[in-house]
Amino acid sequence: MSDTILFIFEGERTEKRLVDNLRQHFLNEDDTIIYATFNTHIYKLYQEIEGYDDENVDTVEVLLDVLRAKKTNTAHLADVSRRSVSQVYLFFDYDGHDTSASDEVISKMLAHFDDESENGKLYISYPMVEAIKHIHQDVGFETVCVEAKTNVGYKALVSNNCDPGYNQVGRYTKEQWQTLIGEHCKKLHYLMSAQFTLPTQYFAQDEIFDKQLTNHITPHNLVAVLSAFPVLIVDYYGADALRDLLT
């Protein structure tokens, strides 16, 4: 029997289209993947679960209850039991410009959601999900940053500054995914070790956030643009397998 993996997205549209397309080329094993959407930012999720920070409370059960209360999830989560869920992945935006934004909250959430087979594993996109397409052949991606705490109209900014072929996130070819995964994984390695090459080791999400804080957010009020989804790919397959996946 295949495992059931729960993907929890912040938004209802872009993330689903993106992952549906990604799964045509990667993550297409026999496991059953179920989607659910929270439909608002990570800071609201923190508010809803902070009262359940107890070792005797099953965080995944709490998440399922929270998600079932939203109409967008009612039908497809109705028959999903806690026992059937083997892994949980959460995908949220940094959204540092939100009035509820808090770097302390991000740190707490990453500490709590740090294992997909226990409480769940949280992945953060900096500054938001549209970071996946913030690539242009004439711009060195390793240095691409945006303001961390100011609403810069990021969706429009990215659409106007990416290569046009990346604007349709639900239509990427395998070759486009290989480019995007490669660029974001090299950007991850650059953030962590100043080397714009494919990573050779695993980097935890809390370590990535700490580097964002140290190198960009605290001193410069910036974030290094980095998508959660290519980081999931390198975590899922492992750094040693990444080069073969991209050729």
Image: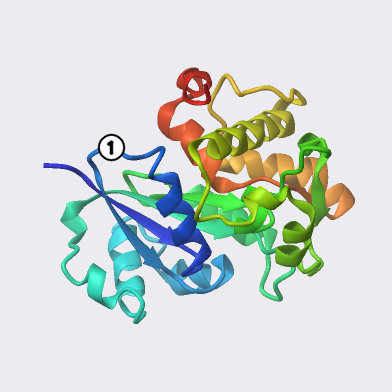
Q: In this view, does 147 lie to the left or right of 103?
A: right
Asked if residue 187 shows in the view, the reply is: yes
Q: Name the residue that disc number 1 marks.
A: 29
Asked if residue 57 shows in the view, the reply is: no
Quick one: 130 or 62, which is closer to the camera?
Answer: 130
Q: Quadrant of residue 201?
A: top right
Q: State the residue at coordinates (58%, 52%).
A: 124
Percent position (x, y) of residue 14?
A: 52, 63
Q: Is residue 69 left or right of residue 181?
A: left
Q: Give neighbour class at mark 1: few <14, some 14-19, many 20+ (Cα, 10 Å).
A: few
Q: Quadrant of the N terminus?
A: top left
Percent position (x, y) of residue 42?
A: 55, 65
Q: State the residue at coordinates (61%, 61%).
A: 105
Percent position (x, y) of residue 131?
A: 66, 52
Is 238 located above or below residue 88 in the figure?
above
Q: Is residue 19 left or right of residue 194?
A: left
Q: State the residue at coordinates (62%, 49%).
A: 132
Percent position (x, y) of residue 222?
A: 82, 52
| Kind of residue sitting beneath label 1 | Glu
Tell me how many marks there are: 1
